[in-house]
Amino acid sequence: MASTDDAHLSWPPLSGPVEIVDIPIRTPLPIYPPPEDVLTYPPLPSPQRQPFVHPSFRLSTHLVPAAYLRTTRYVSPPPASFLPNWQMAKEEKLKKANETRRWLQQAKGSDAEGKKGYERVLWICVNRYYRPDLDKQRGNDKGLTLFFAHANGFPKEIWEPTLRYLLASCSHLVEEIWTWEAVQHGDSALLNEKSLSCIYDWMDNARDILNFFTHFVPCQPSSTVLPVHLPRVSESVAKERASVGLQARNIVAIAHSFGGCSCTSAALTNANLFSSLVLIDPVIMNSYLFQINKGRVDPLLIGALIRRDTWKSKFEARTLFKRNPFFVAWDPEVLDLYVEHGLYSARDEMGDEIVRLKTPAFQEAVVFLEEQTRTEVFARLHTLDVKIKLRWVMPGKIGPNELGPPGSARERVWLRPENSSNIRIPGADHLIAQEKPRELANEITDFLNKTYSRLLQSRL
């Protein structure tokens, strides 16, 4: 494939099945929320807001506890003096980053020797976009509940440009939208600041998503104003959901990178919860890639450890971001939202006002360190229930930035060939949601209109 940007094409089917390396597959821990008597309910870390995504939708922000059992034990962070600082000289910063990487790898490796299942209270912050007039308009047919899960390092608000373009053309299909924030990201990270471990398993993000759908999301979309802390459903309702899903919802998970792997893992655990998956270049990888790269340093992990995480103001941060090659390809509206909702006001050691990343750079590195879940999902994806429709949205660019050697993307999108399709976004790299929100929304709209055409006809 000589072209580096084969615009708007699909990856053609493979001539045969993907060769899958046989690896051990773990059984997820039981999924349930913490008991009520151990919970102290926190306030929202950021105020409620009303962005414009569509005239028919309003926003409310909510909190739910994460799954009580964690796959990894709690490991306290090393002292700040041990970690790299963005103000250090380049050589010293890289030296510190590699020392931190080795420390994290040792902590991660030692976890395999201990028991599995550690009780810990963590919180998840979610945004709900709902129709205030839905109860008046809702008929007997089920509209769509969209669930968005982010890539590593980004807040839940990163989706709002995509939502605005999406709802401009298919709002009639959508009854409710939820945007997710993993425990170490965004507002969730602010709530969990003192409880985050230095080792993390992506399986727990999948389990937290299942915990949300099984124990907390309301039975059906509505115009009801919900409390900040979503009440848990009864045990009998939770058991029904674990068995047959949410009967009054058509749940479409739209998930990017780390979030794409997590949602696929969740669907492999309980396929009845999901109607379809839109996977935006998900980090689902063949285990042999880690074998051939064994001993190499992950540049994403090092990049997270050495990245700048404080600025004098959001204005300074935005100005510097616009000069940073990493952000050059971003849609301007997405960048503005990242600055507004990915940073928060704080004070430095001298008491001066600064802004800081909500998602700690160190925790971003912790997420990058984990490898096991992405290979397990790769090995299991061919077994995903064929009733779940798969739509892969992939970068138009191919080559060195592909997740693996050339051909890896094509291999991934045909892991489960039945009831599956794919599209490539022209000019996009891995960060499709950040670079091409309009084009991404157009592809999601096209998929929803075609997949749920019967629902579309009933609502015209």
Image (cartoon, rainbow, N blue to C red):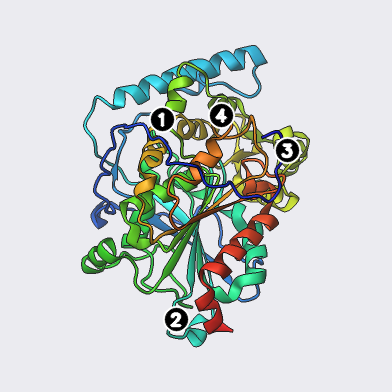
Decide: marks 3, 4 in contact (CB < 8 A)?
no
Kindly identify the residue that appears in the image at 32 percent across and 65 percent down. Answer: 245
Q: Along the polypeptide, which appears first: circle 1 or circle 2?
A: 2
Q: Is residue 343 left or right of residue 379?
A: right
- 312 vs 239, nearest the viewer: 239
Q: Which amino acid does label 1 sit on?
A: Ser
Q: Can residue 123 be spotted in the picture?
A: yes
Q: Along the polypeptide, which appears first: circle 2 or circle 4?
A: 2
Decide: marks 1, 3 in contact (CB < 8 A)?
no
- 315 vs 390, nearest the viewer: 390
Callout 4: 10 Å neighbours few (<14), some, many (20+)? few
Residue 189 point in image, percent of width and height: 48, 44
Q: Which of marks 1 and 2 is in front?
A: 1
- 13 vs 431, nearest the viewer: 13
Q: Nearer the viewer, mark 2 or mark 4?
A: 4
Decide: marks 1, 4 in contact (CB < 8 A)?
no
Q: Mark 2 — residue?
A: 141
Q: Along the polypeptide, which appears first: circle 3 or circle 2?
A: 2
User: Alpha-carbon distance for marks 1 and 3?
Assistant: 35 Å
Residue 97 point in image, percent of width and height: 54, 19
Q: Along the polypeptide, which appears first: circle 1 or circle 3?
A: 1
User: Residue 287 got which mark?
Assistant: 1
User: Alpha-carbon distance for marks 2 and 4?
Assistant: 45 Å
